[in-house]
Amino acid sequence: MNRKHLATRYRITDGKDFRLKDYSPDDTWKLKSKEDAHKWLEEGLARLSDLQDRLYAQNQWSLLLVFQAMDAAGKDSTIKHVMSGTNPQGCQVYSFKVPSEEELNHNFLWRTAKVTPERGRIGIFNRSYYEETLVVRVHPELLAHEKLPSRLITKNIWEERFEDIAAFEQHLARSGVVIRKFYLNVSKEEQRRRFLSRLEEPAKNWKFSTGDLQERAHWDEYMKAYQQVVRHTATEHAPWYIVPADHKWFTRLVVAEVILETLESLDLHYPKVDKAKRKELAAVRLALLKKEAKV
Ligand code: AMP
Ligand code: MG
């Protein structure tokens, strides 16, 4: 079994003919159980830690991981597990909620653009500017609150947003931000089970909000909106991954593998020390050995 398939199997770089229904939420490729995945995940997280160290030291590329999904698909827990092996100093996680008054007073990319990852860092968006073509599309009344001049709100607005997002991602890619986008593909039935456990287990109660049930009622509209997102914004430099999400252990494995494969493709290395610098370091070392304060 070649684990590279885990990354490529769910990758969309050209969304033209993309259909969400071709992707099964309960797929686990050739793996049968959590135990099958366990060793891979352990090994993977160790490699991730080493690669992140190089990414940080090299200080040129950065990685932006975008997570989108329906409620209870496992965004939070996937982020938590996959990043458990990384150095917090090199990671920046942002969760995007209902926009604030200040955010609504700016263009829709503003709040995300100002927190794109610095060079050498891994940035995680838990939801993103894609919400502007998802929740806002499913609930057009939200658009009315966005304070846009009315003549700019036309039937083309979603196409225009896709264009803006694509241009933004192109710009980031050309600046050294490597983008990977994950749609955690949970089934409606599995969401029902997870909602029930949020209601039945006291420790999970806090995760449930009645609004989640209202969004569930719009399931088919969301699926259509997600399909449109992938059709319009999957590219070579910013691919979408349609990650099966009915089995959390498998979701984590696929996401970890994509991150590893991406970092491995960057040829990350520690900055080279030139001759003059080596000489300087040798002199400092000697001074320290002699317990001298000055070189
Ligand atoms: P959660 O991630 O479950 O804490 O919920 C955050 C909520 O914020 C979700 O219901 C999102 O749909 C909503 N949200 C995120 N971005 C936007 C946006 N740009 N416009 C409106 N609602 C949003
Ligand atoms: Mg929620």
Image (tube, helix red, strand yellow):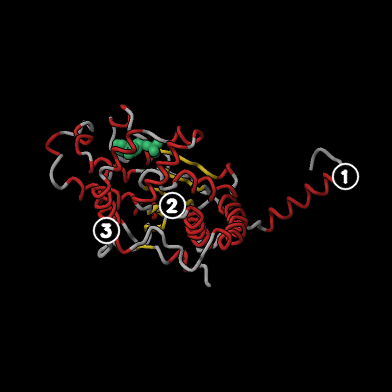
Disc number placed over residue 290 in the picture, else none: 1
Residue bearing mark 2? 177
Residue in the image at 15% along x and 48% along y: 156
Q: In this view of the protein, which residue sits in the foreground, 189 or 244?
A: 189
Q: Counting residues from the N terminus, which is met first, the one under dot 3 or under dot 1?
A: 3
Quadrant of the rendered structure where residue 23 is? Answer: bottom left
Quadrant of the rendered structure where residue 245 is? Answer: bottom left
What's the CA distance linking mark 3 and mark 1?
66 Å
Residues packed near mark 2 inside 10 Å, few (<14), some (14 to 19) or many (20 plus): many
Q: Amino acid at mark 3?
A: Arg
Residue in the image at 29% along x and 40% along y: 215
Q: Nearer the viewer, mark 2 or mark 1?
A: 2
Tell me if residue 290 comes above or below residue 43 in the rendering: above
Quadrant of the rendered structure where residue 151 is? Answer: top left
What's the CA distance linking mark 3 and mark 2?
22 Å
Q: State the SS at label 1.
A: loop
Marks 2 and 1 close (CB-CB < 8 Å): no
Tell me if residue 281 comes above or below residue 215 in the rendering: below
Disc number placed over residue 231 in the picture, else none: 3
Q: Is residue 153 left or right of residue 106?
A: left
Residue in the image at 37% along x and 46% along y: 192
Q: Nearer the viewer, mark 3 or mark 2?
A: 3
